[in-house]
Amino acid sequence: MSVKRTLLGPLCLLIALTASANEELFERAANAAREGDLVQMQQTYETILEAESGNVRALNGKATAQAWRGNYFAAIETYRQSLAIEPENLEALVGIGYTFAWSNDFSYAQASFDRALALRPDNYEAQKGSAYVALWSGDAETARSRFTELSVTSGMNPEISVALGQAHLQLGESKGAYTAFDQALQLDPDTPAAAAGRVAALNAAPKLEAAAWYGSTSNADSGLRLVEVGWWAGRDTRLSARYDDSLSLDNPAIVRRGESARTYLAGVNHAVNDTLAVSLEAGVRQLPDGDQNLYRAEAVLNNLPGKVTLGAQIGDHELGYSDKLYQIGIGIPFAERWQVESNNYFSTVGADRDDEWRSVLNFLYAADSGWNAMVGAGVGEVDRGGLENPENVRVAHAMLSMPVFGYHRLHLVLRNEDLPGNSVNVAMLGFTFRMPR
């Protein structure tokens, strides 16, 4: 008996010292996680496991570090080791659920969260994980319902507000998305995802859009230059009707003469997928020497290293000749909020063939608050029929667009075109009314 008592004291002391050492290591791992040093975090948990391979807390910590580092398969295996020891460990069930979701294995992720919720129906992390599974897998309606329920039962916080806004955006509900993102910013102004989401909500496709532009031109009367009404037949399809009395690039001879060219167009724009959008327009232009039927087509390729725009227009005049315009544009982002665009135009106008080309370089800036600006300049040549030498063209322009009264926008455009024998200055002010979904 005395021998047992003699050994019991040192054994208790050894256990106490081991526990104390482990707590120091756990605190060191937690500090590494807070500092974002995931390598040190994982190595610290591995040090604990070298002495105690079945430590579930350390296994869960190691798996978390592996998952945060993007080593999803390794993390899943480590979580399974933890669950083999404690099949009902909530931390492991929730952790492996998120890891499955991050690796796009949504069915296994949902099954893991369901197991956790069967053990603890009010487990917040499992409820949140189940909502994220719906959001990330594209089931936006279920995600919206789950995040809304979480905001009621557990209270709104910036993370839940942002996720709810993202679900609204997936459903095309720009008004609900804006409200959710704005609430996130009220709770925590330093939430970049909420700021970006609010801008996305403002720019999302509305139900109805109506724009009016008033302009003044140095060699023509001022007045109403453009009116357009657009209606979204679906999230990806926009129908439009437009009245256009602006002096435009697609008939530079009109610009040089300072004549009116009232145009009436109807069109459709359709996003085929995330990469391709196409638009078609048809209408009539009233020229001084007769009417002209217009047909336009444009394709925009997105989600490339940049954006590519291809366009063409044919105008059949009642006098028997055709005007033609071709466009190619390339836009490339070169900083977080900046993009540079190169646009090139080639046109043939009139019975006497005024051939013209222009090359324009634009710089665009988009701010977090939703306003954007553009400045650009370009050069070109006009080769009029019968002239020996082409004549030079120089253009410069600036544009500012900003949100006003919530979803609506105010626009300002200034443009100068230095043309052969003439210089045209244009100033236009526009307002776009947008009815959010």
Image (cartoon, rainbow, N blue to C red):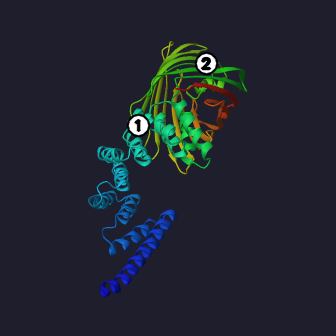
Question: Within the image, what quadrant is residue 178 found in?
Answer: top right
363 and 384: which one is in front? 363
The answer to whether 18 is drawn above or below residue 351 in the figure is below
**Exactly how many numbered labels are in the figure?**
2
1 vs 2, front mark: 1
Helix, strand or loop status at disc 1: loop
87 and 45: which one is in front? 87
The answer to whether 133 is drawn above or below residue 34 in the figure is above
Mark 1–mark 2 Cα distance, whole angstroms, equals 36 Å
The answer to whether 385 is drawn above or below residue 389 in the figure is above
Residue 69 position within the rendered picture, expressed as x and y whole percent measured from the top left = 40, 60
The residue drawn where x is 42% and y is 78% is: 17
Residue 65 position within the rendered picture, expressed as x and y whole percent measured from the top left = 40, 62
Helix, strand or loop status at disc 2: loop
294 and 183: which one is in front? 183
The residue drawn where x is 41% and y is 71% is: 44
Residue at image mark 1 = 274
Q: Within 10 Å of the Cα at label 1, are there few (<14), some (14-19), or many (20+) other Cα atoms? A: few
What is the quadrant of the N terminus in the image? Answer: bottom left
Q: Within 10 Å of the Cα at label 2, are there few (<14), some (14-19), or many (20+) other Cα atoms? A: some
What amino acid is labelled 2 in the image? Ala
What amino acid is labelled 1 in the image? Asp
The residue drawn where x is 43% and y is 67% is: 41
Residue at image mark 2 = 261
Residue 421 position within the rendered picture, expressed as x and y whole percent measured from the top left = 68, 31
Q: Quick one: label 1 or label 2, which is nearer the N terminus?
A: 2
